[in-house]
Image (spheres, grey):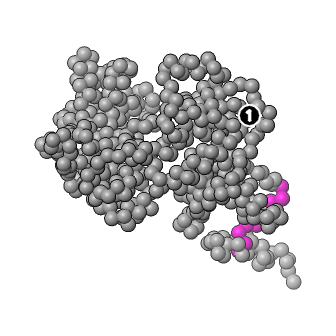
Amino acid sequence: MGNPFEKSNEILDAILNWQYPPFSEETGIDRVVAFGDHSHRCPIYVRQTPPCTGACPAGNDIRAWLTTVQQTELKKRSRQESYQIAWHEASKTTPFPASCGRICPFPCETACNRVKKEAQGVNIAAFERWIGDYGIAQGLDHKKLRTVPMARKVAVVGAGPAGLSCAFQLARRGYPVTVFEALTEPGGMLRYGIPAFRLPRAVLDAEIDAIARMGVDILCSHAIDSNGLQEIRKRFDAVFVGVGAHKGIELDLKGQNAANVFSGVTFLRRVNAGEVFDIGDRVIVAGGGNTAITAARAARRLGAQVTIIYRRTRAEMPTLDREIEHSLLENITIRYLVAPLGIRIENGRAVAVQCVKNGIIVWETQATNYPKCGEGFPNHEPRGCPRGATFSWYTYSPIRLKYPLVRSSLLELWRQSLDTHGEPVEAWRNIINDPDKRRKFQRDRGKGGLVRLSWDEASTITASSLVHTIQRYGPDRIFVQ
């Protein structure tokens, strides 16, 4: 019979020569994917933040809302009980679930794992809106974490979303809170920056009332200046200042100071405050962000014929796709690859906007930089932007652009420093190490003022900044877009 061990074992050969089959979610679960003894390996539970929660600016525990309702039968609860629990879960981190469900750009849905499988995440925003409306309809009150009041009193300056959220969290923990608001009604940008067609006032008022029912005193028409702030600090044990940033972006265009030219924030604030003013029959809105689109839709509701001009393509508009679709349904015209150069004024009022078509204006990191345009204005979008370690400045490929552009204030500082120090790297080091010079340049960022210079000078500035950056921070700090 011979030695049986000399003959290869077919089963052993099959195991040793196993080729792992292609894995897929449809067939992989029925395939053998590994061999061997793994009993010696102890599984370890690693707690991780869900991608939806990680993407949420408020850090909402989104899974808790959804699973609370989903497991109603498993937990032997009624639907109403689950809805109430879900509302309290949704209100732990922010007291505005109904408002956020309407206005939030829902980055949680973009980060949702289901995007990888179905190209669309769970409709979290709709659920948040629904559960927020449920809490309002049922008149639910927020739960306090502490029933015994704390002895220390806290003042909050500003009744916007930051101030009211701070007051809400303090009240949950038992602190007596008083909110001082300069305007006639609380809400801040929620009320004065977002029109009622996006955030109904009844919804906002109801959520603010729920905060007030926790014992928070909200005093409107109480503007606090520096003297008043000192007085408040004497009366209260702690003060939170959340006065907001009600300032729009200006484009530094000739004619922008005309009586009928507004920033988006200013325009929305006047409209939402109920102010009556004439915007004319035709309105041009420059920009492609949420503020620009909202301002355009508000102007349309005031009866104007509205045209949005945006310097890039639709795919590059930072606003939500649904906002663009709503604008088009409301007969708002959107013209892409059109950028404003100046505003023509007659009798103190704007009558026309001078634009450049089919060309993209150079911009800074914040995308608010409109250069002073003169003869030989660039017709192409520049590509390739070596960036300095401290300053935001650019040079561009000569293939795409005939000449480089640089901020005038930086060029002035560079030439002065080079005359003083002689050595280019030392000249650059002198600029960025001097706080006064650095502040002078940074104040001009986003305000235009780009000027033309020679390629020799631009190359010298580029090389000097890169050498200094490598000397100070190492080569890892250098990158090219």
Instruction: Please tell me which residue is depicted at 67% across the width and 55% down the height of the picture.
Output: 135
Where the N terminus falls, by quadrant? bottom right
Q: Nearer the viewer, residue 38 or 293?
A: 293
In the displayed structure, 371 sits above or below 14; it is above
Picture coordinates of residue 7 (x, y %)?
79, 77
Instruction: Please tell me which residue is depicted at 22% across the width and 56% down the height of the picture.
Output: 358
Q: Nearer the viewer, residue 446 or 151?
A: 151
Magenta span: predominant SS is: loop
Farthest right residue in view: 1
Q: Nearer the viewer, residue 400 or 133?
A: 133
Q: How many marks?
A: 1
Res 462 seen here: yes
146 sits to left or right of 135: right
Residue segment shown in magenta: 31-40
In the displayed structure, 231 sits above or below 78; it is above
Picture coordinates of residue 182 (x, y %)?
49, 32
Instruction: Please tell me which residue is depicted at 42% across the width and 59% down the height of the picture.
Output: 323
Q: Nearer the viewer, residue 153 or 97?
A: 153
Farthest bottom residue in view: 1
Q: Which residue is mark 1?
A: 174
- Is residue 36 inside the magenta stretch? yes
- Is residue 239 inside the magenta stretch? no
Check disc 1 and give the amino acid type: Gly
214 sits to left or right of 190: right
Picture coordinates of residue 225 (x, y %)?
48, 23
Instruction: Please tell me which residue is depicted at 31% across the width and 31% down the height of the picture.
Output: 444
Res 334 seen here: no
Quarter residue 249 falls in: top left
338 sits to left or right of 213: left
In the displayed structure, 340 sits above or below 148; it is below
Picture coordinates of residue 66 (x, y %)?
68, 60
Crowd tier of the residue under label 1, counting other residues whose Cα lies within 10 Å: few below 14, some 14–19, many 20 or above: many
